[in-house]
Image (cartoon, rainbow, N blue to C red):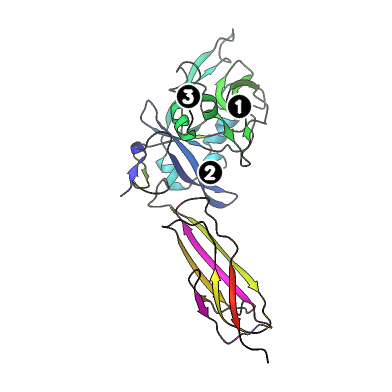
């Protein structure tokens, strides 16, 4: 039985499906907890591309380039999500300090309703709560650290710490960023080297994977809750017909993962005759081929309940018929 976002502990990792370069991919998010309105907030673990907050160098979050991009479900960030995921999102009222609205440059607290947005410095644990309640403890739990700066650090796909934007301004032309060390600094709004790290706001009753699941997925009843690993490969060309073979497929799969294996001796044919085989099991090969030569092949299909598991290069021991 599935549970809901509201039943999770802050700092839990949740997987959402995004469409990236036309491919549906499971992406890791961090459950920050519920905000003051009760909405469940999910922070993308990794950042997306570097973007300017404002080409005009105006440090006002509302209708900034990043704000418009994040809320755009046609060609912006929200276009990555399917209809059921978008339907589960729920507007949250966010606040930020804006120095562009007054004649003397005094900062004013503004607000707007958003489904997707950047974190503020308050939400990242700096200073008071005028720009939202702090979720720093959730980040510490996720990162398994007691050090605030460590919990704020964003790593890119190569594991290198990189700076990212917040929605908080420091004056009329600068937004505050989180540096590669997790500290706060300011940067001009028209710089494009800082990544964006979106937060999504969801209905707290949105279903997630059941208690005890190895990995937690959002909307498990309508989205795939496992990782697929599959490939077909040649295992070599023998001098004579292979009559039987013992297959070895080393892997790091878990006890509850599944793997289906097939092998053949006529891989060069347009339609090879695939034979079921267990890992470290033996299969008897066919006696017919339409190709020019005998060739060994393997087909691997696996389903893993956890990311990062690996299937290594297969090997086979064969018995062949005597040469004429």
Q: Is residue 266 magenta?
A: no
Secondary element under disc 1, as helix, strand or loop, is loop
Q: Quadrant of residue 76?
A: top right
Position of the C terminus, as image quadrant, is: bottom right
Lower position in the chain sequence, tag 1 or tag 3: 3
Residue assigned mark 2: 79
Q: Tell me how far mark 3 sits from mark 2, CA to CA.
A: 25 Å
Say if residue 73 shows up in the picture: no
Front-lying residue, 245 or 100: 245
Q: Residue 110's spot in the image, x, y percent?
A: 49, 19
The residue under the point 51% across, 70% down is: 280
Q: Which label lies toward us, 1 or 3?
A: 1
Checking the image for residue 123, the label placed there is 3
Q: Tell me how far mark 2 sits from mark 1, CA to CA.
A: 31 Å
Lower position in the chain sequence, tag 3 or tag 2: 2
The residue carrying pointer 2 sits among few (fewer than 14), some (14 to 19) or many (20 or more) residues within 10 Å by Cα, namely some
Say if residue 158 shows up in the picture: yes
The residue under the point 47% across, 48% down is: 82
Q: Which label lies toward us, 2 or 1?
A: 1
The answer to whether mark 2 and mark 1 are in CB contact below 8 A is no
Residue assigned mark 1: 181
């Amino acid at each position: 039985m599935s549970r809901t976002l509201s039943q999770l502990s802050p700092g839990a990792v949740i997987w959402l499906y995004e469409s990236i370069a036309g491919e549906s991919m499971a992406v890791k998010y961090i459950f920050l907890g519920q905000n003051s309105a009760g909405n469940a907030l999910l922070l993308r673990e990794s950042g997306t591309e570097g973007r300017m907050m404002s080409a005009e160098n105006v440090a006002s979050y509302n209708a900034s380039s990043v704000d418009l991009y994040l809320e755009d479900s046609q060609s912006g960030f929200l276009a990555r999500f399917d209809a059921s995921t978008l339907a589960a999102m729920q507007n949250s009222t966010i606040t930020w300090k804006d120095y562009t609205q007054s004649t003397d440059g005094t900062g004013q607290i503004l607000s707007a309703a958003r489904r997707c947005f950047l974190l503020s410095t308050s939400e990242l644990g700096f200073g008071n709560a005028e720009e939202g309640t702090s979720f720093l403890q959730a980040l510490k739990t996720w990162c398994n650290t007691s050090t605030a700066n460590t919990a704020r650090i964003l790593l890119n796909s190569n594991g290198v710490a990189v700076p990212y934007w917040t929605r908080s301004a420091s004056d009329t032309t600068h937004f505050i960023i989180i540096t590669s060390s997790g500290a706060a600094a300011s940067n001009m709004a028209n710089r494009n080297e800082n990544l964006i790290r979106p937060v999504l706001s969801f209905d707290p009753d949105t279903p997630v994977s059941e208690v005890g699941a190895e990995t937690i997925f959002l909307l498990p009843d309508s989205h795939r809750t496992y990782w697929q690993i599959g490939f077909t490969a040649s295992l070599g060309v023998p001098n004579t017909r292979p009559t039987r073979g013992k297959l070895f497929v080393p892997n790091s799969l878990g006890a509850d993962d599944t793997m289906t294996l097939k092998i053949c001796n006529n891989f060069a044919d347009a339609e090879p005759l695939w034979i079921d085989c267990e890992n470290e099991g033996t299969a008897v090969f066919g006696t017919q081929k339409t190709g020019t030569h005998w060739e060994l092949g393997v087909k691997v299909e696996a389903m893993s309940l956890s990311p990062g598991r690996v299937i290594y290069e297969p090997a086979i021991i064969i018995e062949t018929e005597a040469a004429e």
